[in-house]
């Protein structure tokens, strides 16, 4: 299928198994080989000077990277894809492709923190001004647009705090003014939300998370539609980005089980979220697939599923008791990069960096990733940690 067919009518579970591999091309081997290579030799002088042939230079693509790009392109429904060495580099190359000195950027206030750092440092030094906006702004975005606004960046749900954004309202306004829109769609993956179908020009994945899915590789993807693609490719080439064939192969391998893993993360995450709602230690659960969540209506309208990452707000406890909660966990690991097979828990505090909105929860905030472990074992782990926390309160 790789490289031959860029649109399918197959269902997502089938697509992730078959896209981006063609055993006929590789003597029947099921997976595309890990092709290592920098130098590509041309058969003749004439081929060389006319740049004839599918491959020209390792950095510009190999069968291993091409096949993953093709698979992502079909899943995203875009016109083209670039692979980057991490999720953050996918964000930065996409932003750089849409902006130049003197431009103005509208950035969602709930964005992944390192994206914010890039805007406040690198983009600011380059002469790009960033205005942060409330994730709930919807059509109100029109009021923030200036003559030099060239890009609007979205992330839904918000990193850590899980606000949903009205993507089609924002993209309709941006389109009418010729402004490029970008979204970090890592939480939903292209299986549960298709940004291009909602008018987004550049769709970004930290493939490190659910696509690779095993906490053993860093990878990013950017899918583009329309005129944004040419600029994306040119920026990518100018910056000299490329990804290792090993990491691309891990991305392709992760893709094969993405649908079944996400189905599990969704079910286990929702079951856990509902259980947490009943716990006396928990004040609120921030999960857009819960009917009680303020973002639920938008999630239901635009998304076809939910992954396994969400947050809880605890009732107030002293810092020492919170530390006991985390230190008592034996199955939930304390780590930042999510989307693997394992469950995770981290404390977070958005109040230190938000500028357009206030983050003032009633108690400590904890982000959870629900992995593949038995759910009763995970609940017992949390139950034990809550009990020990109580003893310190
Ligand atoms: C929403 C989101 N975007 C981007 C990234 C960056 O991904 P990477 O760690 O691959 O650079 C992360 C990482 O946690 C993330 O959560």
Image (cartoon, grey):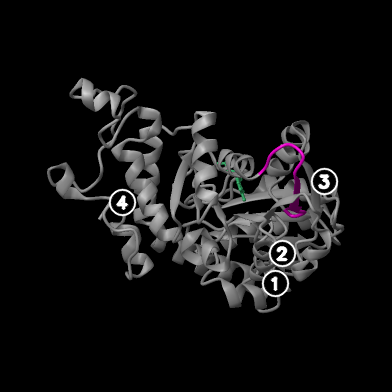
- Crowd band around label 1 with a 10 angstrom C-alpha radius: few (<14), some (14–19), many (20+): many
Look at mark 2 in the image and give the residue it sits on: 163
Look at mark 4 in the image and give the residue it sits on: 20
Mark closest to the chain's N terminus, 2 or 1? 2
Residue 201 at what x, y percent from top left?
A: 57, 56
Rendered image quadrant of residue 9: bottom left
Q: Does the magenta-highlighted stretch encompass residue 35?
A: no
Q: Is residue 73 visible?
A: yes
Look at mark 1 in the image and give the residue it sits on: 295
- Say what secondary structure mark 3 lies in: loop
Q: CA distance from mark 3 to mark 2?
A: 16 Å
Specify the segment rendered in magenta.
Answer: 99-110
Q: Quadrant of ligand 1?
A: top right
Residue 138 at what x, y percent from top left?
A: 75, 69
Mark closest to the chain's N terminus, 1 or 4? 4
- Say what secondary structure mark 2 lies in: loop
């Amino acid at each position: 299928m790789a490289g031959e067919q860029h649109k399918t009518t197959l269902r997502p579970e089938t697509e992730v198994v078959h896209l981006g591999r063609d055993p006929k091309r590789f003597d029947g081997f099921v997976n595309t080989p890990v092709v290592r290579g920098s130098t590509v030799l041309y058969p003749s002088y004439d081929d060389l000077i006319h740049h004839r042939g599918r491959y020209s230079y390792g950095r510009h693509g190999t069968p291993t990277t091409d096949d993953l790009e093709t698979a992502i392109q079909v899943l995203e429904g875009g016109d083209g894809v670039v692979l980057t060495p991490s999720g953050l580099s996918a964000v930065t190359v996409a932003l750089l492709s849409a902006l130049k000195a003197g431009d103005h950027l509208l950035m969602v206030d709930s964005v992944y923190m390192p994206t914010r750092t890039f805007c406040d440092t690198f983009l600011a030094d380059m002469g790009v001004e960033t205005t942060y906006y409330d994730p709930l702004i919807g059509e109100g975005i029109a009021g923030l647009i200036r003559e030099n606004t060239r890009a609007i960046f979205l992330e839904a749900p918000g990193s850590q705090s899980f606000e949903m954004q009205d993507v089609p309202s924002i993209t309709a306004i941006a389109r009418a003014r010729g402004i490029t829109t970008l979204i970090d769609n890592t939480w939903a993956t292209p299986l549960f939300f298709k940004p291009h179908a909602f008018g987004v020009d550049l769709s970004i994945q930290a493939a490190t998370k659910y696509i690779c899915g095993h906490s053993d590789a860093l990878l990013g993807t950017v899918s583009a539609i329309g005129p944004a693609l040419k600029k994306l490719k040119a920026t990518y080439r100018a910056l000299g980005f490329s990804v290792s064939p090993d990491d691309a192969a891990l991305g392709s391998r992760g893709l094969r089980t993405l649908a079944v893993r996400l189905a599990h993360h969704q079910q286990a995450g929702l079951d856990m979220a509902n259980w947490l709602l009943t716990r006396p230690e928990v004040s609120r659960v921030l999960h857009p697939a819960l009917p009680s969540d303020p973002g639920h209506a938008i999630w239901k309208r635009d998304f076809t599923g939910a992954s396994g990452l969400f947050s809880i707000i605890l009732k107030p406890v002293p810092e020492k008791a919170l530390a006991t909660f985390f230190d008592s966990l034996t199955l939930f690991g304390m780590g930042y990069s999510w989307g693997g097979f394992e469950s995770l828990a981290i404390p977070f505090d958005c109040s230190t960096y938000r500028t357009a909105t206030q983050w003032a929860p009633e108690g400590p905030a904890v982000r959870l990733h629900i992995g593949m472990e038995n759910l009763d074992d995970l609940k017992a782990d949390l139950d034990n940690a809550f009990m020990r926390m109580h003893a310190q309160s």
